Image (cartoon, rainbow, N blue to C red):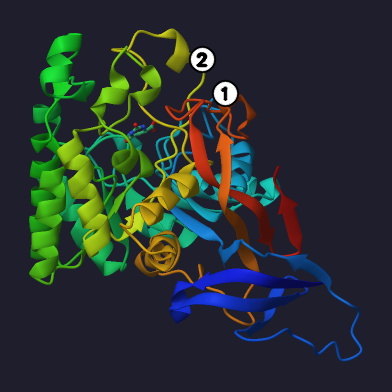
Amino acid sequence: MRLLIINGHVIDPSRDFAGSADILIEDGRIKTFAKEGRIKENQGKPEPRVIDAAGMWVVPGLIDMHTHLREPGFEHKETIKTGALAALKGGFTTVCAMPNTNPVNDNAGITEFILKMAQAAGGARVLPIGAVTKGQRGEELAPFYAMREAGCIAFSDDGRPVASPVIMRRALEYAKGLDALIISHAEDPALAGSGVMNEGLLSATLGLKGQPSVAEEVMIYRDIALAELTGGRLHIAHVSTRGGVRVIRQAKERGLKVTAETCPHYFSLTEDAVAGYNVNAKVNPPLRTAADVEAIKEGIRDGTIDVIATDHAPHGREKRTRQFDDAPSGISGLETALSLGLALVDEGVLTGLELIRKLTVNPAGILCIDKGALIEGTEAELVIFDPEKRYVLDAEKMISLGKNTPFDGRQLKGRVIKTICGQKVLEWD
Ligand code: DOR
């Protein structure tokens, strides 16, 4: 199979390139990347299928460092198959699966199961993230070495914090020996209490328990201090607060090896989305204030925040039918991330190249994987994206089983048109 993509606006952060280029794909691999002019050489080979990408962005397959796929155990929320297909529709050809399944991914057997199911699913590549502690109970370290051997790309107790500083210290020490990454769900459980939204005037008005920003900030401080002590590699998940951005910025200024991500909802929405007890805007950490949103954008702009990850957290009926206090937290995010990210470009926070960097080479570098670049000889993983296409999101039409999104019914701009993955060319309406 030969495929020639012409006339596109190609963005490849791995070579600092954004401009017109043609790309020839042969047998599922990138054969030629030509910055100028058409690729003419057919050399007796069959004529390629030509994709005219005029007006489109052509970018490397995106990498999501933070996805909840729910299988095993919560297949009514998402299966590995539906999640891995939803990822492709959103432009993600690689997703990292968080371990808060049932059973938890805290041993090599579960890791192998996830990899086997992902292989059979034929969607995005799935890289499992192992739990830091057995059962994510925060008491005893999971067997990192065996899980790493089985294919875990990093370790995290995401969904809940590692409450004990002693356990987190040991995790960072042990992971350092394996050169493995620890991803912190930064939430001080005592300060967060049973808060279900951001603490402030609005939570008081709504009569809901609030979770203060300082619960995140304190835990980021703690984990950075422990990373400094141990020399372990630390990544902070879903940063949502102004204070969190500030602490990470200071740590980076001191030369510490910490990286960080935020998610589209933290730069697209404020806590006001919760008004009316909208469960689809219930997420953990919670949506914050306008000042936090501005600080997150500044952190994205100045590089304090390295990565945009989805924290795709699909839920089923239990999200719709329970009261706000009892409903599970999370937003189904794989299929809207790129559109929401594009708004940062339209607002002038990032260039297109910088946006795609935070969705490709930056996560690839942190995860130490050879992905997210348009390099000759590598497997073809590309996304063709129309940055001008406007559409009204219909959650019911999303591939993900999780229809829980506060963006349902909202007009969004920018849509994935095609995802190319090896020999497959998937076309989306
Ligand atoms: O809102 C969230 N949902 N935050 C998390 O940390 C976990 C996630 C989930 O698993 O549903």
Residue at 48% x, 49% y is 338
Please state which of the two labelled residues, at mark 2 or mark 1, is closer to the viewer: 2
Q: Is residue 347 visible?
A: yes
Residue at image x 17%, y 17%? 203
Task: Give percent across and percent down for residue 54.
Answer: 67, 65
Please name whichever residue, 368 or 339, is drawn nearer the observer in this view of the structure. Answer: 339
Please rate how many residues cluster around mark 2, counting C-alpha atoms within 10 Å: few if below 14, some from 14 to 19, many from 20.
few
Q: Which residue is mark 1?
A: 76
Q: Residue at x 12, y 72 (%)?
A: 255
Quadrant assignment for the C terminus = top right
Q: Residue at x 39, y 56 (%)?
A: 345
Q: How far from the left and from the top, in percent, is residue 243? A: 10, 45
Q: Quadrant of ligand 1?
A: top left
Kindly report the distance in space between the C-alpha atoms of the residues bearing marks 2 and 1.
9 Å
Nearer the observer, 116 or 37: 37
Would you identify the image quadrant in which residue 394 lies?
Answer: top right
The three-letter amino acid code for the residue at tag 2 is: Arg
The residue identified by callout 2 is 317
Q: Which quadrant of the rendered structure holds the N terminus?
A: bottom right
Q: Tell me which numbered mark, 2 or 1, is placed earlier along the sequence.
A: 1
Kindly identify the amino acid type of the residue bearing the numbered disc 1. Answer: His
Mark 1 crowdedness (10 Å alpha carbons): few <14, some 14-19, many ≥20: some
Question: Tag 1's secondary structure?
Answer: loop
Contact (CB < 8 A) between labels 2 and 1?
yes
| Position above or below: 290 against 376 | above
Q: Label 2: state its secondary structure.
A: helix
